[in-house]
Image: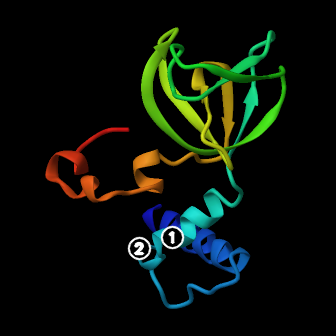
Amino acid sequence: MAATTARRVRIAATACAVLMGGSLLGASTAQASPSSADTVAHPKKPYGIVLARSGLNVRQYPSTDSSVKYVLPYGAKRGLDCKIRAQLIHGDPIWYKLRHSNFWISGRYTKAVGHVKWCKDVRPSALNNTAKAQKAMG
């Protein structure tokens, strides 16, 4: 039974390698690089779809205290650059920075499609090199 499972794993790994344009012949599944898995799992840039029927406020900063720059209509799709944890909006702390701008939208009324990285990982700074910053979430 274990031999059958191991054989199925090898067949699946080989099939994945062929689909990715490479070959794992002679290599175990543990030797596959994690970066190639990320490429397959997240091939396109992430975007968000507006879920709020009345539209979604696009803000200067990730807070309802921030000024509204414009409103995205229901169903609008916009590129997402990164995400952070900020002001809770009905229990959801996630805010997305829009791609190609410095504006923000609430994650509560946005369906994210694709993998959205944390802003601290997209734009690292010298402040991120401290031990406390390395352990920070979001």
Mark 2 or mark 1: whose residue is earlier in sequence: 2
Residue 96 x %, y %: 58, 35
Q: Judge the density around disc 2: few (<14), some (14-19), many (≥20) Cα neighbours within 10 Å.
A: few
* C-alpha distance separating marks 2 and 1: 13 Å
> Considering depth in this image, is 59 or 105 the residue closer to the camera?
59
Q: In the picture shown, does residue 73 fall above or below 85? A: above
Asked whether the residues under the numbered discs 2 and 1 touch, taking CB atoms below 8 Å apart as contact, a structural biologist would say: no
Q: Residue at the location (55% across, 74% down)?
A: 10
Residue 117 x %, y %: 51, 48
Q: Is residue 87 left or right of residue 137?
A: right
Read off the residue under disc 2. Answer: 30
Q: Residue at the location (45% across, 55% down)?
A: 123
Could you tell me which quadrant the C terminus lies in? Answer: top left
User: Which of the labelled discs sits on residue 35, or is there none?
Assistant: 1
Q: Farthest residue toward the left?
A: 131
Q: Judge the density around disc 1: few (<14), some (14-19), many (≥20) Cα neighbours within 10 Å.
A: few
Q: Which color scheme does this rendered protein use?
A: rainbow
Does dot 2 land on a helix, a strand or a loop?
helix
Residue 3 x %, y %: 47, 69
Is residue 67 visible in the rendered image? The answer is: yes
